[in-house]
């Protein structure tokens, strides 16, 4: 693996860890009572954009929670900056994506029960 790829992975892991802590510190009340988990982070090669994948339980609240995350993206990015500002020159822009793998697992389990 190239030096760049390794750096990308390290930054993505660090962002995932910090972002998970930020979400956890907000508590479920901030997300309409839903449990939000940061399931992964991908980062652009130039480290300027972080794609944050979240899984939401119960999945019925996913739309509302994604809306809350997108509305608060600037504030969340600011908090992220406070945590990783010493390690990164530029705090990446953040984009949220719904990780539907949990729904997929539930669907498969239901099919297997039949």
Image (spheres, grey):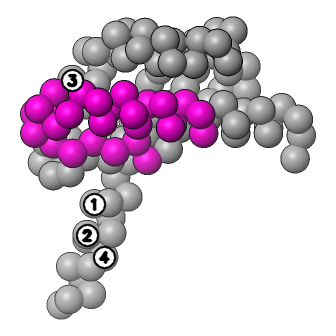
The total of numbered circles placed on residues is: 4
Q: Say which quarter of the image contains residue 15.
A: top right
Mark 1 or 3, nearer chain start: 3
Question: Alpha carbon of mark 4 to alpha carbon of mark 3: how far?
Answer: 29 Å
Question: Alpha carbon of mark 2 to alpha carbon of mark 3: how far?
Answer: 25 Å
> Which label is found at residue 103?
1
> Which label is found at residue 106?
2
Residue 10 x %, y %? 70, 37
> Which label is found at residue 108?
4
Q: Say which quarter of the image contains residue 85.
A: top right
Mark 3 is surrounded, within 10 Å at the Cα level, by few (under 14), some (14 to 19) or many (20 or more) other residues, namely some
Does the magenta run of residues contain 18? yes
Q: Label 2's element?
A: helix
Mark 1 is surrounded, within 10 Å at the Cα level, by few (under 14), some (14 to 19) or many (20 or more) other residues, namely some
Q: Is residue 93 visible?
A: no
Q: Nearer the viewer, mark 1 or mark 3?
A: 3
Circles 4 and 1, Cβ within 8 Å, touching? The answer is no
Question: Alpha carbon of mark 1 to alpha carbon of mark 2: how far?
Answer: 5 Å
Find disc 3 in the rendering and name its residue. 68
Question: Alpha carbon of mark 4 to alpha carbon of mark 1: how far?
Answer: 9 Å
Mark 4 or 3, nearer chain start: 3
Question: Alpha carbon of mark 1 to alpha carbon of mark 3: how far?
Answer: 20 Å
């Amino acid at each position: 693996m190239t030096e760049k790829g390794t750096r990308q992975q390290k930054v993505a892991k660090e962002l995932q860890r910090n972002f998970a802590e930020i979400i956890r510190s907000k508590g479920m009340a901030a997300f309409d009572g839903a449990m939000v988990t940061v399931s992964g982070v991908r980062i652009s090669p130039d480290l300027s954009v972080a794609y944050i994948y979240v899984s939401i339980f119960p999945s019925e609240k996913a739309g509302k929670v994604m809306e809350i995350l997108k509305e608060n993206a600037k504030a969340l990015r600011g908090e992220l900056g406070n945590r990783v500002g010493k390690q990164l020159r530029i705090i990446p822009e953040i984009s949220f994506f719904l990780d539907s793998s949990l729904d997929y697992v539930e669907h498969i389990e239901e099919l297997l029960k039949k």
